[in-house]
Image (cartoon, grey):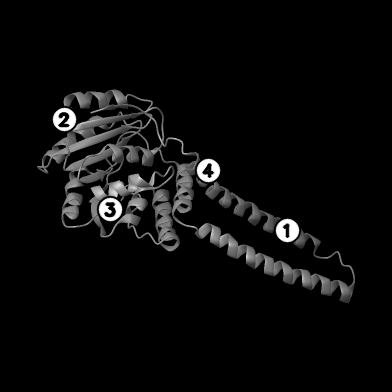
Amino acid sequence: MNKQISVVIPVYNEEEVLESLFQRLFPAMDELKSTYEVIFINDGSKDKSLEILTKVHSKYPDKTVIIDFNKNYGQHMAIMAGFEQSSGEIVVTMDADLQNYPEDIGLLIDQVEQGHDVVGGVRVNRQDKKWRLLVSKLHNSLRLKLTGIDMVDEGCMLRAYTKDIVKQVIATEENSTFLPALAHSFAANPTDIDVRHAAREEGTSSYNLYKLIRYNFDFFANFSKAPLEFFTMLGLAVSTISFILFLYLIIQRFMHGPDAEGVFTLFALTFFFIGIVLMGLGIVGEYIGRIYEEVRKRPRFIIKKILK
Protein backbone atom coordinates (compact mmCIF):
# COMPACT_ATOMS: atom_id res chain seq x y z
CA MET A 1 0.00 0.00 0.00
CA ASN A 2 1.30 3.41 -0.92
CA LYS A 3 2.19 5.69 1.95
CA GLN A 4 1.78 9.43 2.13
CA ILE A 5 5.32 10.00 3.44
CA SER A 6 8.56 8.04 2.94
CA VAL A 7 11.59 8.87 5.07
CA VAL A 8 14.90 7.68 3.58
CA ILE A 9 17.85 7.31 5.97
CA PRO A 10 21.27 5.93 4.93
CA VAL A 11 23.11 4.17 7.75
CA TYR A 12 26.85 3.56 7.96
CA ASN A 13 28.35 2.43 11.28
CA GLU A 14 25.75 4.22 13.39
CA GLU A 15 25.12 1.62 16.11
CA GLU A 16 25.74 4.16 18.88
CA VAL A 17 22.97 6.54 17.80
CA LEU A 18 20.29 4.33 16.21
CA GLU A 19 18.28 3.66 19.38
CA SER A 20 18.09 7.40 20.11
CA LEU A 21 17.04 7.98 16.51
CA PHE A 22 14.18 5.48 16.82
CA GLN A 23 12.99 7.01 20.08
CA ARG A 24 12.64 10.42 18.44
CA LEU A 25 11.81 9.60 14.83
CA PHE A 26 8.73 7.38 15.19
CA PRO A 27 6.92 9.65 17.69
CA ALA A 28 7.68 12.65 15.45
CA MET A 29 6.21 10.84 12.44
CA ASP A 30 3.15 9.68 14.42
CA GLU A 31 2.38 13.30 15.29
CA LEU A 32 1.99 14.13 11.59
CA LYS A 33 -1.18 11.97 11.44
CA SER A 34 -0.20 10.61 8.03
CA THR A 35 0.61 7.12 6.80
CA TYR A 36 4.36 6.74 6.53
CA GLU A 37 7.28 4.39 6.04
CA VAL A 38 10.89 4.74 7.14
CA ILE A 39 13.43 3.24 4.74
CA PHE A 40 16.81 2.48 6.33
CA ILE A 41 19.68 1.61 3.99
CA ASN A 42 22.55 -0.27 5.61
CA ASP A 43 25.45 0.99 3.51
CA GLY A 44 27.98 -1.75 4.27
CA SER A 45 28.20 -1.07 8.02
CA LYS A 46 30.88 -3.02 9.85
CA ASP A 47 29.34 -2.62 13.32
CA LYS A 48 25.99 -3.85 14.69
CA SER A 49 23.88 -1.40 12.72
CA LEU A 50 22.20 -4.09 10.62
CA GLU A 51 21.35 -6.14 13.71
CA ILE A 52 19.73 -3.10 15.33
CA LEU A 53 17.84 -2.24 12.14
CA THR A 54 16.53 -5.81 11.90
CA LYS A 55 15.17 -5.55 15.44
CA VAL A 56 13.37 -2.28 14.76
CA HIS A 57 11.81 -3.85 11.66
CA SER A 58 10.47 -6.67 13.85
CA LYS A 59 8.98 -4.04 16.15
CA TYR A 60 7.53 -1.85 13.37
CA PRO A 61 7.05 -4.20 10.38
CA ASP A 62 4.36 -2.01 8.80
CA LYS A 63 6.39 1.19 9.16
CA THR A 64 9.93 0.18 8.23
CA VAL A 65 11.83 -1.07 5.20
CA ILE A 66 15.42 -2.26 5.59
CA ILE A 67 17.74 -2.34 2.56
CA ASP A 68 21.06 -4.13 3.10
CA PHE A 69 23.92 -3.42 0.67
CA ASN A 70 26.65 -6.01 0.10
CA LYS A 71 29.29 -3.28 0.71
CA ASN A 72 29.67 0.47 1.11
CA TYR A 73 28.53 2.47 -1.93
CA GLY A 74 28.31 5.92 -0.39
CA GLN A 75 25.59 8.15 0.96
CA HIS A 76 24.05 9.20 -2.34
CA MET A 77 23.79 5.72 -3.82
CA ALA A 78 22.17 4.62 -0.55
CA ILE A 79 19.60 7.39 -0.89
CA MET A 80 19.05 6.41 -4.53
CA ALA A 81 18.24 2.86 -3.43
CA GLY A 82 15.83 4.29 -0.87
CA PHE A 83 14.18 6.39 -3.58
CA GLU A 84 13.67 3.31 -5.73
CA GLN A 85 11.92 1.47 -2.88
CA SER A 86 9.87 4.43 -1.66
CA SER A 87 6.10 4.54 -2.13
CA GLY A 88 5.31 7.90 -0.50
CA GLU A 89 3.79 10.89 -2.25
CA ILE A 90 6.38 12.94 -0.33
CA VAL A 91 9.91 11.63 0.20
CA VAL A 92 12.10 13.02 3.00
CA THR A 93 15.81 12.36 3.39
CA MET A 94 17.87 12.79 6.55
CA ASP A 95 21.07 11.51 8.12
CA ALA A 96 21.05 8.96 10.93
CA ASP A 97 23.45 10.85 13.18
CA LEU A 98 20.75 13.06 14.78
CA GLN A 99 22.50 16.27 13.81
CA ASN A 100 19.21 16.93 12.04
CA TYR A 101 16.10 17.00 14.23
CA PRO A 102 13.44 14.41 13.27
CA GLU A 103 10.94 16.79 14.84
CA ASP A 104 11.60 19.26 11.98
CA ILE A 105 10.31 16.87 9.29
CA GLY A 106 6.85 18.36 9.68
CA LEU A 107 8.19 21.78 8.66
CA LEU A 108 9.33 20.38 5.32
CA ILE A 109 6.05 18.52 4.78
CA ASP A 110 4.12 21.77 5.30
CA GLN A 111 6.15 23.45 2.55
CA VAL A 112 5.51 20.61 0.10
CA GLU A 113 1.80 20.78 0.84
CA GLN A 114 1.94 24.50 0.01
CA GLY A 115 3.08 23.64 -3.53
CA HIS A 116 6.87 23.39 -3.40
CA ASP A 117 8.35 20.35 -5.16
CA VAL A 118 11.77 20.49 -3.46
CA VAL A 119 12.31 21.76 0.07
CA GLY A 120 15.84 22.13 1.42
CA GLY A 121 16.79 22.50 5.04
CA VAL A 122 19.09 25.36 6.04
CA ARG A 123 21.06 24.56 9.20
CA VAL A 124 20.75 27.31 11.80
CA ASN A 125 23.73 27.71 14.16
CA ARG A 126 25.70 24.87 12.60
CA GLN A 127 27.60 22.79 15.13
CA ASP A 128 30.38 21.63 12.79
CA LYS A 129 34.09 22.33 13.14
CA LYS A 130 35.38 25.68 11.86
CA TRP A 131 37.35 24.20 8.97
CA ARG A 132 34.23 22.44 7.71
CA LEU A 133 32.24 25.67 7.92
CA LEU A 134 34.94 27.42 5.86
CA VAL A 135 35.04 24.67 3.23
CA SER A 136 31.24 24.71 3.02
CA LYS A 137 31.15 28.49 2.58
CA LEU A 138 33.74 28.41 -0.21
CA HIS A 139 31.99 25.53 -1.93
CA ASN A 140 28.57 27.22 -1.81
CA SER A 141 30.04 30.33 -3.42
CA LEU A 142 31.77 28.36 -6.18
CA ARG A 143 28.74 26.19 -6.81
CA LEU A 144 26.46 29.12 -7.56
CA LYS A 145 29.03 30.77 -9.87
CA LEU A 146 30.03 27.62 -11.78
CA THR A 147 26.78 25.64 -11.96
CA GLY A 148 24.00 28.18 -11.43
CA ILE A 149 22.38 25.80 -8.91
CA ASP A 150 21.03 28.09 -6.20
CA MET A 151 20.91 26.01 -3.02
CA VAL A 152 21.31 27.78 0.30
CA ASP A 153 22.74 24.82 2.25
CA GLU A 154 23.50 21.87 0.01
CA GLY A 155 25.24 19.94 2.80
CA CYS A 156 22.04 19.61 4.80
CA MET A 157 20.47 16.23 4.02
CA LEU A 158 17.17 17.04 5.74
CA ARG A 159 15.18 17.59 2.55
CA ALA A 160 11.77 16.82 1.10
CA TYR A 161 10.81 15.95 -2.47
CA THR A 162 7.59 15.27 -4.30
CA LYS A 163 7.08 11.85 -5.87
CA ASP A 164 7.46 13.32 -9.37
CA ILE A 165 10.89 14.75 -8.55
CA VAL A 166 12.00 11.41 -7.09
CA LYS A 167 10.89 9.61 -10.26
CA GLN A 168 12.93 12.00 -12.40
CA VAL A 169 16.00 11.47 -10.22
CA ILE A 170 15.64 7.68 -10.48
CA ALA A 171 15.21 7.87 -14.26
CA THR A 172 18.67 9.43 -14.73
CA GLU A 173 20.35 6.14 -13.69
CA GLU A 174 23.56 8.03 -12.98
CA ASN A 175 26.41 6.19 -11.28
CA SER A 176 28.06 9.23 -9.74
CA THR A 177 25.95 12.17 -8.70
CA PHE A 178 24.93 14.50 -5.89
CA LEU A 179 21.24 13.92 -5.30
CA PRO A 180 20.17 17.24 -3.70
CA ALA A 181 21.65 19.22 -6.61
CA LEU A 182 20.25 16.80 -9.19
CA ALA A 183 16.77 17.03 -7.69
CA HIS A 184 17.07 20.81 -7.43
CA SER A 185 17.91 21.02 -11.15
CA PHE A 186 14.54 19.35 -11.92
CA ALA A 187 12.52 21.50 -9.52
CA ALA A 188 9.95 23.99 -10.78
CA ASN A 189 9.20 25.58 -7.40
CA PRO A 190 11.97 24.87 -4.87
CA THR A 191 12.33 26.57 -1.52
CA ASP A 192 14.51 26.49 1.62
CA ILE A 193 13.55 26.69 5.29
CA ASP A 194 15.50 26.99 8.52
CA VAL A 195 15.99 23.78 10.51
CA ARG A 196 17.84 23.09 13.73
CA HIS A 197 21.29 21.54 13.84
CA ALA A 198 22.92 19.66 16.71
CA ALA A 199 26.47 18.62 17.45
CA ARG A 200 27.16 14.95 16.87
CA GLU A 201 26.88 13.25 20.26
CA GLU A 202 27.91 9.71 19.34
CA GLY A 203 30.19 8.18 16.69
CA THR A 204 32.34 10.04 14.21
CA SER A 205 31.67 11.59 10.84
CA SER A 206 32.68 9.52 7.81
CA TYR A 207 33.61 12.72 5.95
CA ASN A 208 37.27 13.61 6.49
CA LEU A 209 39.20 16.32 4.62
CA TYR A 210 40.15 13.97 1.76
CA LYS A 211 36.55 12.86 1.23
CA LEU A 212 35.36 16.45 1.25
CA ILE A 213 37.94 17.33 -1.44
CA ARG A 214 36.82 14.31 -3.48
CA TYR A 215 33.22 15.37 -2.97
CA ASN A 216 33.99 18.80 -4.45
CA PHE A 217 35.66 17.21 -7.49
CA ASP A 218 32.65 14.93 -7.95
CA PHE A 219 30.14 17.74 -7.61
CA PHE A 220 31.69 20.12 -10.13
CA ALA A 221 32.52 17.35 -12.61
CA ASN A 222 28.90 16.18 -12.53
CA PHE A 223 27.19 19.54 -12.80
CA SER A 224 29.49 21.90 -14.66
CA LYS A 225 31.92 22.09 -17.58
CA ALA A 226 33.50 25.19 -16.04
CA PRO A 227 36.80 23.47 -15.06
CA LEU A 228 37.28 22.30 -18.67
CA GLU A 229 36.34 25.72 -20.04
CA PHE A 230 38.75 27.38 -17.58
CA PHE A 231 41.69 25.32 -18.84
CA THR A 232 40.71 25.96 -22.45
CA MET A 233 40.91 29.70 -21.83
CA LEU A 234 44.08 29.28 -19.76
CA GLY A 235 45.65 27.27 -22.59
CA LEU A 236 44.85 30.04 -25.08
CA ALA A 237 46.34 32.65 -22.77
CA VAL A 238 49.51 30.63 -22.15
CA SER A 239 49.91 29.96 -25.89
CA THR A 240 49.62 33.66 -26.64
CA ILE A 241 52.14 34.63 -23.96
CA SER A 242 54.52 31.88 -25.11
CA PHE A 243 54.35 33.13 -28.71
CA ILE A 244 55.10 36.70 -27.59
CA LEU A 245 58.02 35.43 -25.46
CA PHE A 246 59.35 33.47 -28.46
CA LEU A 247 59.30 36.57 -30.66
CA TYR A 248 61.03 38.54 -27.91
CA LEU A 249 63.85 35.97 -27.62
CA ILE A 250 64.34 35.87 -31.40
CA ILE A 251 64.62 39.64 -31.55
CA GLN A 252 67.02 39.66 -28.60
CA ARG A 253 69.24 37.07 -30.29
CA PHE A 254 69.50 39.07 -33.52
CA MET A 255 70.11 42.35 -31.74
CA HIS A 256 72.48 41.21 -28.98
CA GLY A 257 73.64 37.73 -29.98
CA PRO A 258 73.43 34.50 -27.91
CA ASP A 259 72.88 35.17 -24.21
CA ALA A 260 72.80 32.69 -21.34
CA GLU A 261 71.23 35.14 -18.90
CA GLY A 262 67.67 34.34 -17.89
CA VAL A 263 68.07 30.59 -18.44
CA PHE A 264 66.88 29.75 -14.94
CA THR A 265 63.88 32.03 -15.34
CA LEU A 266 62.96 30.10 -18.47
CA PHE A 267 63.35 26.84 -16.55
CA ALA A 268 61.00 28.15 -13.86
CA LEU A 269 58.45 29.19 -16.47
CA THR A 270 58.75 25.82 -18.19
CA PHE A 271 58.09 23.91 -14.97
CA PHE A 272 55.15 26.20 -14.19
CA PHE A 273 53.57 25.55 -17.58
CA ILE A 274 54.18 21.80 -17.26
CA GLY A 275 52.41 21.91 -13.90
CA ILE A 276 49.42 23.62 -15.50
CA VAL A 277 49.32 21.00 -18.26
CA LEU A 278 49.40 18.14 -15.74
CA MET A 279 46.63 19.75 -13.68
CA GLY A 280 44.55 20.19 -16.80
CA LEU A 281 45.07 16.55 -17.76
CA GLY A 282 43.94 15.56 -14.27
CA ILE A 283 40.70 17.50 -14.66
CA VAL A 284 40.10 16.01 -18.10
CA GLY A 285 40.73 12.61 -16.51
CA GLU A 286 38.01 13.29 -13.92
CA TYR A 287 35.47 13.82 -16.70
CA ILE A 288 36.68 10.83 -18.72
CA GLY A 289 36.47 8.67 -15.61
CA ARG A 290 32.82 9.58 -15.18
CA ILE A 291 32.10 8.84 -18.83
CA TYR A 292 33.81 5.47 -18.33
CA GLU A 293 31.64 4.70 -15.29
CA GLU A 294 28.45 5.55 -17.17
CA VAL A 295 29.17 3.61 -20.37
CA ARG A 296 30.11 0.42 -18.49
CA LYS A 297 26.52 0.15 -17.26
CA ARG A 298 27.53 -1.82 -14.20
CA PRO A 299 25.10 -1.97 -11.26
CA ARG A 300 25.26 1.18 -9.15
CA PHE A 301 24.83 -0.93 -6.04
CA ILE A 302 24.05 -4.50 -5.09
CA ILE A 303 21.33 -5.23 -2.54
CA LYS A 304 21.78 -8.37 -0.44
CA LYS A 305 18.25 -8.33 0.98
CA ILE A 306 15.25 -6.14 1.62
CA LEU A 307 13.03 -6.44 4.68
CA LYS A 308 9.53 -5.10 4.09
Q: In front: 74, or 2?
A: 2
The quadrant of the rendering that contains the N terminus is top left
- Disc on the earlier residue, 1 or 2: 2
Mark pair 1, 3: CA separation: 47 Å
Labels 3 and 4 touching (C-beta < 8 A): no
Residue 130 is situated, as x and y percent measured from the top left of the image, at: 39, 50
Q: Amino acid at mark 1?
A: Thr
Check disc 4 and report the residue beneath it.
292
Q: Amino acid at mark 3?
A: Gly
Quadrant housing residue 63: top left
- Disc on the earlier residue, 3 or 4: 3
Task: Identify the residue at image location x=40%, y=38%.
Answer: 74
Check disc 3 and report the residue beneath it.
120
Mark pair 3, 4: CA separation: 31 Å
Q: Which mark is residue 62?
A: 2
Q: Which mark is residue 142?
A: none
What kind of element bears circle 2?
loop
Residue 130 visible in the shown view: yes
Position of 131 with respect to 237 (left or right) is left
Q: Nearer the viewer, mark 1 or mark 4?
A: 4
Labels 1 and 4 touching (C-beta < 8 A): no
Residue 259 is situated, as x and y percent measured from the top left of the image, at: 87, 67
Mark pair 2, 3: CA separation: 28 Å
Q: Which mark is residue 270?
A: 1
Position of 83 with respect to 250 (left or right) is left
Labels 4 and 2 touching (C-beta < 8 A): no
Label 2: how many residues lie within 10 Å, few (<14), some (14-19) or many (20+)? Answer: few
Q: Nearer the viewer, mark 3 or mark 4?
A: 4
Task: Identify the residue at image location x=17%, y=25%.
Answer: 59
What kind of element bears circle 4?
helix
Residue 97 visible in the shown view: no
What kind of element bears circle 3?
strand
